[in-house]
Image (tube, rainbow, N blue to C red):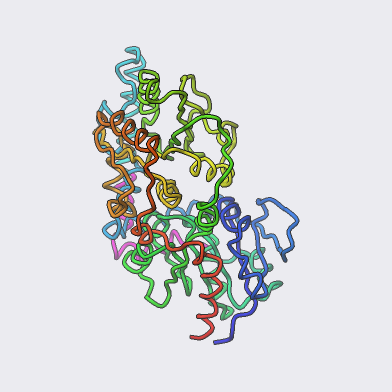
């Protein structure tokens, strides 16, 4: 195999722009190889000391719709490989059964509004069942191979993207990815036709267990840790020599600052509350905790909760009128979608402890040596209740390995567990991160993503 010298990195999404392009993720790569960057034209055009080419994403709705539906069928066909695949099918076709208790605040509605809601809900269930039947039919092996594959095929060429590759002349193309995206088959197709190696890198904890099957496989896939390596093999069918453990550039930032004293921006003690992308009733927890702090000032004094709703949660609160609750400054403004990692990590580092939902923030808090109070109680009629998700997400099945997580699996225990954790921290009880976090995310200040990535390419050259 030709030695790799010229590398092209494709940045196709805003999250990958923030998490890779704007960090030191490619620092070692830039120092040791001839690196060019190919960015989607809808990303910021900042003047950095890099060779950059911009390409036009395919915006054709029909093409993107076919591609999305194809990945949906692939996910359904592989539903036995990952609990999350089954859950995502149910989520995207929710509701599939009729129950009045699924209608939020039903008892508070006026009678005429109740009738409308019931009729709408009934119709939604009816049409979703038809959609589900269609998915099942199109996913049968014979039908899929003869019919579905062709009907939902997509053109794997993007002239604008390929023109950039012709300019950069890569030996290897790297793509950080956060979910199934059209550039993935386009890059694999170009690489195969031009005898170039392809290397995809996961951006998130759950990429390989929740975002469908990668049908057009690259030559190599970079993952967070041992858990994702297992998912790459057992769920995505990558071979052992294709899977490379890298860590994550976001955690590199944590390793570089967690042992340093960081300036506190707030004049009071606080607990950081991390919300979830899906619309579960986390506001009810916020109100419970607000009342807890107000009723026990002898314990909490002037302490607050900084509430950080998930930036992409559509119905998130942006203002809140509770004495002891403050909305994180990063997510107050309309249109804030990818807020600053710097401010976010400052808030974790300076908190007494962190609490909230099943988000990557759980691992980030743990890496900062913070206790994490995981709200994982179940609500039978809340489709997105965290207790339900704890059983349905493949990537969180081994969380009990991490001994610094406090599991709150009963709603009635929220105030007691919160109070006990608060007292522990006021008494100066310190925790070091459990070694078991390395199962989920590899790395430390001497074992960073940027160095692991560069080393992996030298290793590829030796094969």
Residue 370 occupies which quadrant of the picture? top left
**Main structural element of the magenta stretch: helix, strand or loop?**
helix
Q: Is residue 136 visible?
A: no
Assign the N terminus to one quadrant of the image. Answer: bottom right
* x 33%, y 56%: residue: 138
Q: Quadrant of residue 408?
A: top left
Horizontal arrangement in the rendering, residue 139 relative to residue 270 (left or right) = left
Find residue 319 and report its horizontal and vertical position in percent. Answer: 52, 24
Where residue 274 sits in the image (x, y, percent)? Answer: 44, 38
Please state the horizontal and vertical placement of residue 84, each as a whole percent of the image.
Answer: 32, 52
Up-down: is 172 above or below 71?
Answer: below
Relative depth, front residue between 47 and 346: 346
Looking at the image, which is closer to me, 183 or 172? 172
- Relative horizontal placement of residue 409, taking residue 369 as reference (left or right): left
Count of marks placed on residues: 0
Q: Is residue 170 left or right of residue 70?
A: right
Q: Nearer the viewer, residue 99 or 327?
A: 327
Residue 106: in magenta span: no
Q: Nearer the viewer, residue 361 or 69?
A: 361
**Residue at the spot x=54%, y=64% of the render?**
155
Q: Is residue 310 above or below residue 193?
A: above
Kindly give the residue lying farthest to the front in the view shown: 427
Q: Position of residue 310 (x, y in %)?
A: 47, 38
Give the extent of the magenta segment. 131-154
Queried whether the magenta region covers residue 152, the answer comes back as: yes
Q: Can I make out residue 199 in this image?
A: yes
């Amino acid at each position: 195999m030709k030695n790799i010298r010229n590398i092209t990195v494709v940045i196709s999404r805003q999250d990958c722009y923030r998490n890779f392009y704007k960090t030191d993720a490619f620092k070692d790569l830039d120092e040791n190889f001839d690196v060019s960057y190919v960015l989607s034209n809808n990303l910021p055009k900042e003047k950095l000391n890099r060779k950059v080419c911009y390409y036009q994403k395919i915006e054709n709705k029909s093409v993107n719709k076919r591609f999305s539906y194809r990945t949906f069928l692939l996910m359904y066909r592989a539903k036995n490989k990952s609990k999350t695949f089954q859950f995502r099918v149910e989520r995207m076709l929710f509701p599939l059964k009729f129950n009045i208790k699924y209608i939020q605040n039903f008892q508070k509605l006026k009678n005429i509004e109740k009738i409308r809601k019931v009729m709408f809900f009934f119709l939604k269930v009816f049409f979703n069942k038809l959609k589900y039947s269609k998915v099942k039919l199109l996913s049968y092996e014979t039908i899929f191979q003869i019919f579905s594959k062709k009907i939902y095929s997509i053109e794997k060429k993007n002239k604008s993207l390929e023109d950039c590759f012709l300019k950069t002349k890569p030996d290897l193309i790297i793509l950080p990815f956060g979910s199934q995206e059209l550039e993935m088959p386009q890059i694999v197709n170009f690489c195969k036709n031009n005898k170039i190696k392809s290397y995809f890198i996961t951006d998130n904890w759950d990429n390989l267990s929740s975002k469908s099957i990668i049908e057009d496989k690259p030559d190599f896939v970079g993952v967070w840790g041992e858990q994702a390596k297992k998912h790459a093999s057992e769920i995505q069918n990558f071979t052992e020599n294709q899977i490379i453990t890298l860590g994550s550039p976001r955690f590199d930032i944590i390793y570089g600052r967690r042992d340093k004293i960081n300036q506190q921006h707030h004049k009071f003690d606080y607990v950081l509350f991390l919300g979830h992308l899906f619309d579960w009733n986390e506001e009810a927890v916020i109100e419970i905790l607000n009342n807890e702090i107000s009723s026990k000032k002898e314990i909490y004094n002037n302490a607050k909760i900084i509430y950080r709703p998930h930036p992409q949660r559509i119905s998130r609160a942006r203002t809140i009128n509770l004495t002891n609750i403050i909305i994180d400054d990063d997510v107050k403004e309309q249109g804030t979608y990818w807020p600053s990692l710097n401010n976010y990590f400052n808030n974790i580092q300076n908190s007494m402890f962190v609490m909230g939902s099943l988000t990557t923030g759980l691992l980030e808090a743990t890496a900062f040596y913070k206790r994490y109070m995981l709200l994982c109680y179940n609500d039978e009629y809340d489709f997105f209740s965290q207790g339900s998700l704890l059983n349905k997400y493949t990537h969180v099945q081994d969380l009990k390995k991490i001994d610094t997580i406090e599991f709150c699996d009963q709603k009635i225990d929220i105030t007691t567990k919160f109070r006990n954790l608060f007292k522990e921290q006021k008494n100066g009880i310190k925790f070091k991160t459990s070694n078991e976090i390395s199962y989920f995310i590899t790395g430390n200040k001497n074992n960073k993503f940027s160095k692991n990535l560069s080393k992996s390419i030298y290793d590829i050259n030796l094969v």
